[in-house]
């Protein structure tokens, strides 16, 4: 199986659901959509979180040591991701390319899934890493063809798709 709640626990899919909503909202805003559309990703995310909650009932809890290891791993790589996003945005700004912000962020987010896939281990995250990185690179290479809204909606779909695969 690509992933399961048994291997990820409920926290991973919940976090991915929320960030999927954030990417979708960024896509809507960058596409100039009416604010009423923001309700759509919120509803999708709420539904995914409800399903994760229902399906995670009865799962065995991780040991304290395993929880601490996972917390440290995710914390370290999320910190590295944050620094990477800061650097990427500053590089785009330095070159006068704010149109590349979302693509650069998407690439960094994609790359941060690689050590998580190995360390957690959740092999499905390698696919998430590849798809997010490819979206980011495509947006950086040709922002006219792969507009920021396309990158953002694509990232949302990758994250929500990852959750659905985990729920499998």
Image: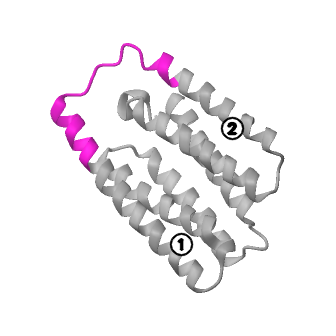
Residue 41: numbered disc: 2
**125 in relation to 106, above or below:** above
Q: In this view, does 59 lie to the left or right of 69?
A: right
Q: In the rendering, at what x and y percent does residue 12 appear?
A: 43, 37
Q: How crowded is mark 1: few (under 14 residues within 10 Å), some or many (20 or more)?
A: some
Question: In this rendering, does residue 143 appear at all?
Answer: yes
Q: Distance between the residues labelled 1 and 2?
A: 25 Å
Residue at the image point whose x is 52% and y is 51% from the top: 128
The quarter of the displayed image where residue 97 is located: bottom right
Q: Position of residue 113 (x, y in %)?
A: 43, 54
* Residue located 62% across and 25% down the image: 47
Q: Which residue is drawn at 53% across and 59% down?
A: 130
The residue tagged with tag 1: helix, strand or loop? helix
**For residue 75: magenta?**
no
Q: Which residue lies furthest to the left in this view?
A: 65
Name the residue tied to disc 1. 89
Residue 109 drawn at (x, y percent): 49, 59
Our reading of the magenta stretch's main secondary structure is helix
Q: Visible in this render: residue 2?
A: no
Q: In this view, does 56 lie above or below 75?
A: above
Residue reaching furthest to the front: 35
Q: Is residue 131 above or below residue 85?
A: above
Q: Give the range drawn in magenta.
A: 52-72
Q: Where is residue 94 in the image (x, y as percent from the top left)?
A: 56, 85
Dot 2 crowding, Cα within 10 Å, few <14, some 14–19, many 20+: many
Front residue of 11 and 87: 87
What's the coloring here? one colour
């Amino acid at each position: 199986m690509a992933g399961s709640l048994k291997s990820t626990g409920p926290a991973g899919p919940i976090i991915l659901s929320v960030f999927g909503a954030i990417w979708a909202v960024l896509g809507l805003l960058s596409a100039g959509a009416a604010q009423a559309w923001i309700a759509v990703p919120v509803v999708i995310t709420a539904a995914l979180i409800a399903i994760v909650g229902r399906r995670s009932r009865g799962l065995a809890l991780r040991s304290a040591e395993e929880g601490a290891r996972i917390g440290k791993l995710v914390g370290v790589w999320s910190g590295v991701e944050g620094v990477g996003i800061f650097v990427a945005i500053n590089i785009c700004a330095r070159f006068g390319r704010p149109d590349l912000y979302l693509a650069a962020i998407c690439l960094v987010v994609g790359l941060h899934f690689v050590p998580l896939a190995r360390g957690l281990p959740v092999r499905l995250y390698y696919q998430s890493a590849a798809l997010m990185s490819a979206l980011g690179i495509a947006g950086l290479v040709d922002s006219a063809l792969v507009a920021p809204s396309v990158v953002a909606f694509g990232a949302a779909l990758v994250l929500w798709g990852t959750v659905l695969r985990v729920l499998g």
